[in-house]
Image (cartoon, rainbow, N blue to C red):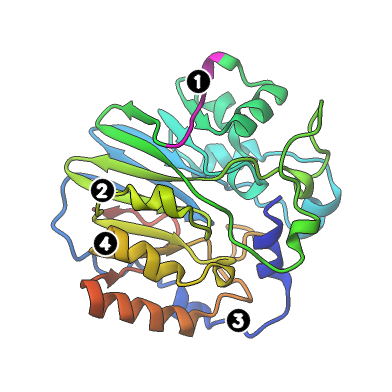
Amino acid sequence: MCVACAFAVVVPGRAADPSDVFPTTPDPWPLAPVGVTMTWTGVAGFLFEAEGIRIAIDPYVSRPGLFATLFRRARSDGLAVERRLPPLAAVFVGHTHFDHALDLESIAARFPACRIHGSRTTAELCRRRGIATARLSEVRDTDSVTVGPFRVTAIRAEHGLVPLVRFVDRLDLPSEGVPRTPFRWPRGEVFAYRVEVKGRGFYVQGSAGLDDAALARQPPCDVLIACLAARKGTPRYLDRLAERLRPSVLVPCHHDDFFRPLEEAPRPIATLRWKAFLVEAAALAKAHGTVLVRPTRFASVVA
């Protein structure tokens, strides 16, 4: 599982006020719309729609809870997928921890036209869970995929770091079978994704670790979507992203408690350090003119 991120969720700390972190409606969008909608589905999940085509990055809606994550067999909630997600043409997976990849089986079953793109580890896990190889695409750093009006490029990244987590985090699949509980799902390779559509560029950093060489190749983007969980172990995390990408908009993600059911109001992870993030976001505004937009789960933004 995303052990580092779970640590950030469950370790006691001074959590931010939920009303400050999660507005009831998204903050105003500062850019002129180009005919694209963007929807945050919680954790690192985002839907993009343009010209009737929908793609998703890291869609995860099952939310089995902490006890089930630690001790029960990994099981996607197909009804939650059907209720929460629209038909998808493609899914792109940042890494294989359960809070990014658990629902791929249900998505494949319910949306037969959907193709799944991810690392070698993600593809192999999908095969072992019964998803046909023909529906899987392994991606590597710099690979680009065109889906309707979207062009999506994989960018090598790293996972956020938390002390001691390296001793328990599984990096790859066992030689055969699938880990029994979500807690033991492997990380595999980690990717950020650049989504380009209708002249607008979205850079989705779904994990708070950076690969400097891969980041150095990136041109500026319009929108930076940045994971906040486990970012403390990445020095100057937001500064380094913004210095290279020069985003006009900053959208935080992976800052909600992903053990909490979607039917309940979102709650920040205990180690969010929201006030520190606001200071960092203000520095980006001063240096690059970047505007912070706090998303609301399942509220679409015309971007």
Q: Pointer 2: residues within 10 angstroms few (<14), some, or many (20+)?
A: some
With respect to residue 40, does 228 lie above or below? below
Cβ–Cβ under 8 Å for marks 3 and 1: no
Q: Tell me residue 238's x, y (percent).
A: 41, 68
Mark 4 residue type = Pro
- Front residue of 81/162: it is 162
For numbered disc 4, what is the local secondary structure?
Answer: loop
**Residue 140 magenta:** yes
Q: Distance of mark 4 from mark 2, alpha carbons?
A: 9 Å
- Structural distance between the alpha carbons of marks 2 and 3: 32 Å
- Location of residue 122 (image quadrant): top right
Label 3 – label 1 distance at C-alpha: 40 Å
How far apart are the alpha carbons under marks 1 and 4?
35 Å
Q: Give residue 60's position: percent from left, percent from top.
A: 57, 46
Mark 1 to mark 2 CA distance (whole Å): 28 Å
Q: Circle 2 — which element? A: strand
Residue at mark 3: 15
Q: Dot 4: few (<14), some (14–19), or many (≥20) neighbours within 10 Å? A: many
Sequence-first tag of 4 and 2: 2
- The stretch of residues the image draws in magenta is 134-141
Amino acid type of disc 1? Answer: Pro
The spot of residue 210 in percent (x, y) is: 49, 56
User: In the shown orientation, is residue 8 left or right of residue 228?
Assistant: right
In primary-sequence order, the first of circles 1 and 4 is: 1
Residue under pointer 2: 201
Q: Are marks 1 and 2 in contact (CB under 8 Å)?
A: no
- The answer to whether mark 3 and mark 4 are in CB contact below 8 A is no
